[in-house]
Image: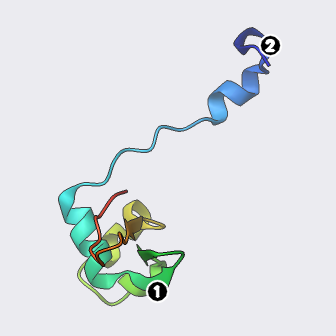
Amino acid sequence: MPFAYLPFAYLHQTQVIPSPSIDMIRIALAYGKYQFHSNARTWTLLDKCLRNTMYERTIDRLRGLRIIAPIDKQGCFKVSW
């Protein structure tokens, strides 16, 4: 669909998500829920992960942050977001 034909309401629904800072990545690695699947390690920050921590007041900013670290053939991983 060409850009000129998109409904006006659709243009307001798109969001620009800022990239996480190094501190946000560190918090996700320290407090996030760890999972391993599809040759990748993931850490996801949930509300319950941050409750009763010093980062509880920043739950709204950190909610849903996911760090994905794909694992290569040598068993090493590179953090990306």
Q: Secondary structure at mark 1?
A: helix
Instruction: Give the camera-side residue of 52 and 34.
Output: 34
Q: Is residue 14 visible?
A: yes
The disc placed on residue 77 is: none
Looking at the image, is 38 positioned above or below residue 1? below
Q: Give the residue type at disc 1.
A: Lys
Q: Left or right: where does residue 24 sit relative to residue 71?
A: left
Q: The N terminus is located in which quarter?
A: top right
Instruction: Give the camera-side residue of 19 and 61.
Output: 19
Q: Which residue matches tag 2?
A: 5
Q: Left or right: where does residue 66 sit relative to residue 57?
A: right
Q: Left or right: where does residue 40 sit relative to residue 57?
A: right
Q: Residue at x 26, y 64 (%)?
A: 24
For discs 1 and 2, the disc positioned in front in the rendered view: 2
Q: Which residue matches tag 1?
A: 48
Q: Residue at x 47, y 37 (%)?
A: 16
x, y (%) of residue 25? 27, 66
Q: Is residue 45 visible?
A: no
- Ranked by sequence position, the earlier of labels 1 and 2 is 2
Looking at the image, is 76 positioned above or below residue 23? below
Q: Residue at x 77, y 19 (%)?
A: 6
Residue 53 occupies quadrant = bottom left
Q: Give the residue type at disc 2.
A: Tyr
